[in-house]
Amino acid sequence: MKKTRAQKQRYELHISQLASQGDGVAYRDDKAFFVPFAAPGDRVLAQAQKTQGRNVQCKLLQILSSGSARVTPPCPLFQTCGACDWQHVAYDVQCDNKARWLQQILSHTPIPFTPSPAALGYRRLARLHARTRVDGSVQMGFHARKGRHIVDTHDCPMLVPSLREALAPLRQILLPTIPHAVTLSLSAGTAGAFVHVQSPQPLPPHHYETARHLCQTRALAGVSANVDGISAHIAGDAWVASNASDGQGMRSPHASFGQANDAINLALGTCIRNWLLERAPFQHALELFAGAGNLTLLLLPHLPRITTVEWDTHACQAARHNVDRRQETDSPDTATVSIHEGDAVVAYPQFAQRCDLVVLDPPRKGCEALCHHMKDAPHRTIIYVSCNPLTLARDLAILAQGQWRITAAHGFDMFAQTRHVEVAVCLER
């Protein structure tokens, strides 16, 4: 499409804040200008690329003067790699902007916000992409900011030390055994780095031999694979040992959903525990999207009965183990726990009438269909944990039709250096 004259126009702009999609924002002539890689306080020269109503998407041409929020990015791949948005912005400013979004989206009143204790070196989960080139060299890294090509990553300052240390043996030893493109799910546990290889084709025999060698030397703690939809443990530890949201141990499958930031996961657990204590007693909790039990274990001391629903077979197996182990060491009057494998929307009507508390932590897309079921249900309290405030706001609007209202909310910087933000809300009638 040919650009219009207005779209080609250049503007000198003063950036005032950060937008929820990551760009810097400037206001001029009753319009909002969105400029990638601009920081609050910057004075920039930008070129209009696309205009929609009063919003103008721009290209950054030049930083005329830097604002006090601008810092030097710690990673040389910043702006190319698509994993981080805000390495050029001071961390306190990142958090201030996230807290402001939550206030605008959820209640228009200040919401408590917990920064990450570590703004770098915090990430214990990562998904990398890899392929072997024609010359035999390996390309491994995150997808690019634009497009789907791989940005070759030899190091990443966002990762916890054990995952950073695992990048070299992965690139130099394990990946050369795979002649086609794969996806790697990395997770850090108390024993070290775990790798789950997702492959569309069979893996050669020497890949399995190499994986066993790396685990025997403890270069990796465990290796598993999913080949054409079938998952199997290959070498090392079969489960990732880490800490649940109550700060005590749990185990999970190599590739299952988990929280990426241990310290923030603990802060999230503390917040939810306080909400439970303030509203106790509860008789029966229904936990949806329960995973391997990160929140289930937190609920154990506070309820006589818990029912969980999770679609991942391996996560359900881990959850049963985690609950059994915890109940072996805790008081004998801890909760009776029923763990069900299945879809949350399908399973919900089966359990809804029995539960006075619902706890859910859905994926980024939220749970629109489920909220239509929940809005008229006879629960006393709903605790909703979300990694996407926009889909959360949509779901809360549905629940509001059933007279549910937010009585507590708390934001968490689970993903420092990015635009993503975690939030938990407590709803009552």
Image (cartoon, grey):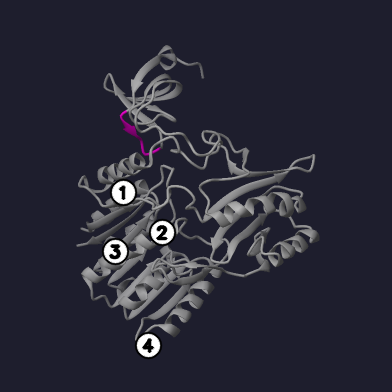
Quick check: 38 above or below 192?
Answer: above
Of tags 2 and 4, the one toward the viewer is 2
Percent x, y for residue 305? 34, 79
* Residue at image mark 2: 263
User: Could you tell me the amino acid type at mark 2?
Assistant: Ala
* Residue at image mark 1: 393
User: Could you tell me the amino acid type at mark 3?
Assistant: Ile
In this view of the protein, which residue sits in the foreground, 219 or 212? 219
User: Could you tell me the amino acid type at mark 4?
Assistant: Pro
* Residue at image mark 4: 332
Q: Tell me the element at label 4.
A: loop
Please report whichever mark, 4 or 3, sits nearer to the chain's N-terminal start: 4
Q: Tell me the element at label 3.
A: strand
Please report whichever mark, 2 or 4, sits nearer to the chain's N-terminal start: 2
Please report whichever mark, 1 or 4, sits nearer to the chain's N-terminal start: 4
Q: CA distance from mark 2 to mark 1?
A: 26 Å
Q: CA distance from mark 3 to mark 2?
A: 24 Å
Q: Residue at x 79, y 40 (%)?
A: 134
* Residue at image mark 3: 382
Segment tinted magenta in the rendering: 16-21
Of tags 1 and 4, the one toward the viewer is 4
Question: Is residue 18 in the magenta section?
Answer: yes
Q: Mark 2 and mark 4 in contact? Answer it, CB < 8 Å.
A: no
Of tags 4 and 3, the one toward the viewer is 4
